[in-house]
Image (spheres, coloured by chain):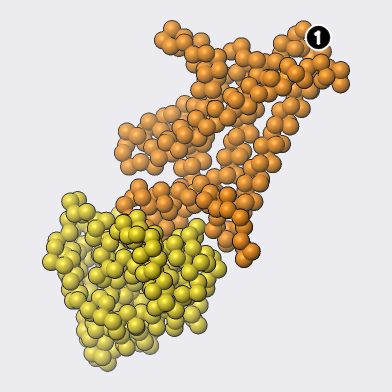
Chain colours: A yellow, B orange
Amino acid sequence: MICIKQLHKSFGSLEVLKGIDLTINKNQVVVLLGSSGSGKSTLLRCINFLEFYDQGEVWINNKKIDFHQTDLNKVREEVGMVFQHFNLFPHKTVLENIIEAPIYVKKMKKQEAEHTALELLAKVGLKDKAGEYPHMLSGGQKQRVAIARALAMEPKVMLFDEPTSALDPELVGEVLQVMKQLASEGITMVVVTHEMGFAKEVADQVVFMDEGKILEQAPPHVFFNQPESERSKKFLRRVL
Amino acid sequence: MIDIFLSTYKFFLGATWLTLKLTLTSLFLGSCIGIIFAFFRLSKKKALNYLATIYINVIRGTPLIVQIAILYFGIANIVTLSPFWAGSLALAIHSGAYIAEIFRGLIQSIDKGQMEAARSLGMPYHLAMRRIVLPQAFKLAIPPLGNQFIIGLKDSSLVAYVGMQDLWGAALSEASSNFQQMNTYIIVGLYYLALVLILSYLVGKLEARLEVDSKNRPNRTFKNLFQFKTASS
């Protein structure tokens, strides 16, 4: 599904990714763990080309993406992203947020787009909020709308960049619930998170990153019970 | 003073109309120029960026009266512009530089996450700019643009010096014939004051309608302007 080879990325003199190799299979949920500054988010943003890497290769669906030649808009249509700060469009209603890209990018008929949008809203439990503006919603509701908005493009893979980090603790559960549901439906997901419970329960693979490198990659029961490196043991002692 | 007011109001109302025409024409053109040059300033293409920087610095760095004079007298050998168009164009080019900086600042002030979210949905840059970023920026533009429009209205008085009978031009010729400079200038000042107050009032109305002041409720854009407020808002 997604294959990353020897990815390097620097911001100025700071090397954030130091040769990442990672394969994400179809229908898998991969959770990226690591302390802040370890390069998790940058790696995620390289997959949908919000950041351009300096060296290496990204393959999506057996196609090598060359960001000078490939139409990145087409790539991004197939890679949905959910942001830490939701990034809903404040001047549009919940429904308008969701139908915007299907109508203007996929050229879907408005009626059809609205029909799909309402189904997605029902799925995330917010059908009654279709006409509201984002500022009327709680953080958890905003994030669920953002998930519905990304799903409306029918992406082949969903990227989650710390989707619950900006939420009040009591609102985290409702967002994780939706994400668990997506995982159970077999949607391919790459999740950067600090929610260890989610990683343990939902992930097929846990990837532990430190200082721009992948230190460990294992199924969650292996990673959480028998971490290999000293660094990951230390990390787990702190967060668990 | 009242007798002067009564004897001049027909003349001055005609001149007011000319001032309004000048102001509206130049501010409309100036806004167009401003938007275009704001994009030039934000452009990754170096040539466009330099062009916009030079334009903004030269225009902001020279007096408006000089610009009007150059446009009217200076390039008379190349093209002849009527006083109205020389004045309108000079005012438009002048206010355009300031408006460009207003728009540039506002576009940059919109959270980067908005553009990223739009791009992550597969929207091309220009579509994301048009559908997502600009509607939010335009709404925030109303207070500073209102300010710029007030300045433009008053600046239009300088076209009197290329022989136009706008409000200030009319005041100059009236005062030279009735020898009541003080009273005439006060009266014409009141005309400007009235125009500016009306303009401020309209801008204020527009702000209230679009709820510009509410950071937490940035939900209305120009699209909503002509819709009735719903009970819930």
| Residue A24, image x, y percentages | 20, 74
Q: Please tell me which residue lies in front, A51 or A14.
A: A51
Q: Which residue is mark 1?
A: B179
Up/down of A3 relative to A71, above or below: below
Q: Is residue A115 left or right of residue B148?
A: left
In the displayed orientation, state which residue is furthest to the front: A111
| Residue A45, image x, y percentages | 30, 64
Residue drawn at x 50%, y 82% as measured from the top left: A170
Residue drawn at x 63%, y 27% as measured from the top left: B20
Instruction: Examine the image and state in which quarter residue A117 appears.
Output: bottom left
Up/down of B225 relative to B6, above or below: below
* Residue B181 visible, this orientation: yes
Up/down of A27 relative to A237, above or below: above
Which chain does the residue under circle 1 lie in? B
Instruction: Examine the image and state in which quarter residue B87 appears.
Output: top right
Residue drawn at x 38%, y 31% as measured from the top left: B51
Give the residue type at disc 1: Phe
Q: Is residue A71 left or right of residue B41?
A: left
Residue drawn at x 70%, y 31% as measured from the top left: B195
Q: Is residue A90 left or right of residue A215?
A: right
In the rendered picture of this protein, how many numbered marks are placed on residues?
1
Up/down of A176 relative to A159, above or below: below
| Residue A160, image x, y percentages | 34, 72
The quadrant of the picture occupied by the N terminus of chain A is bottom left
* Residue A163 visible, this orientation: no
The quadrant of the picture occupied by the C terminus of chain A is bottom left
